[in-house]
Amino acid sequence: MRSARMVETIYGCKWSLTVYQLLVNGINRPGEMVRSVEGLTTKVLNECLRKNLEFGILERTAYPEIPPRVEYAVTPFGARFIHILDELEKLQDECSDAEK
């Protein structure tokens, strides 16, 4: 059941897929993510990142610098999970096309 809850939680978060796309495009710092996406707030982003960290989809690296620097990256498990989400999107598109 944990996997079903994970898919529901992550897929249900409208910003998770956006965050994955940002990471693919090399945008891995929270401030840069917020600036890159209209409508994305720091609070919502932090909640989204927290959920992805809990499930092991993303990893967080904090650098001991001043000012502090934090970066996020997709884990190997996360890459597999994102591939599955991509396949779900394709299936959904096929179902939508079949209904037309």
Image (tube, grey):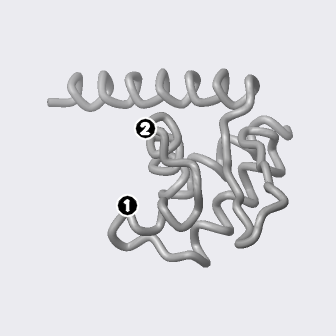
Furthest-left residue in this view: 100
Q: Is residue 2 left or right of residue 90?
A: right
How many numbered discs?
2
Residue displayed at 52% across by 41% down: 23
Between residue 100 and residue 88, name the one nearer to us.
88
Between residue 36 and residue 99, name the one nearer to us.
36
Furthest-front residue in this view: 66
Residue 40 lies in quadrant: bottom left
Residue 78 lies in quadrant: top right
Residue displayed at 56% across by 57% down: 13
Residue 3 placement (x, y as % from top left): 79, 35
The numbered mark, 2 or 1, whose residue comes first in the sequence reads: 2
Contact between labelled residues 1 and 2, with CB atoms less than 8 Å apart: no
Assign a secondary structure to mark 2: loop
Q: Quadrant of the N terminus?
A: top right
Q: Quadrant of the C terminus?
A: top left
Residue displayed at 48% across by 57% down: 14
Give the vertical position of 37 relative to 41 (above or below).
above
Residue 24 placement (x, y as % from top left): 48, 34
Residue displayed at 67% across by 48% down: 72
Amino acid type of the residue that numbered disc 1 sits on in the rendered structure: Ser
Crowding at label 2, few (<14), some or many (≥20) Cα neighbours within 10 Å? few
Q: Which mark is residue 61?
A: none
Assign a secondary structure to mark 1: helix
Crowding at label 1, few (<14), some or many (≥20) Cα neighbours within 10 Å? few
Residue 29 placement (x, y as % from top left): 58, 56
Q: In whole angstroms, how far apart are the C-alphas of marks 2 and 1?
A: 11 Å
Residue 74 placement (x, y as % from top left): 67, 35
Where does label 1 land, which residue?
Answer: 36
Where does label 2 land, which residue?
Answer: 25
Amino acid type of the residue that numbered disc 2 sits on in the rendered structure: Asn
Give the vertical position of 27 relative to 94 (above or below).
below
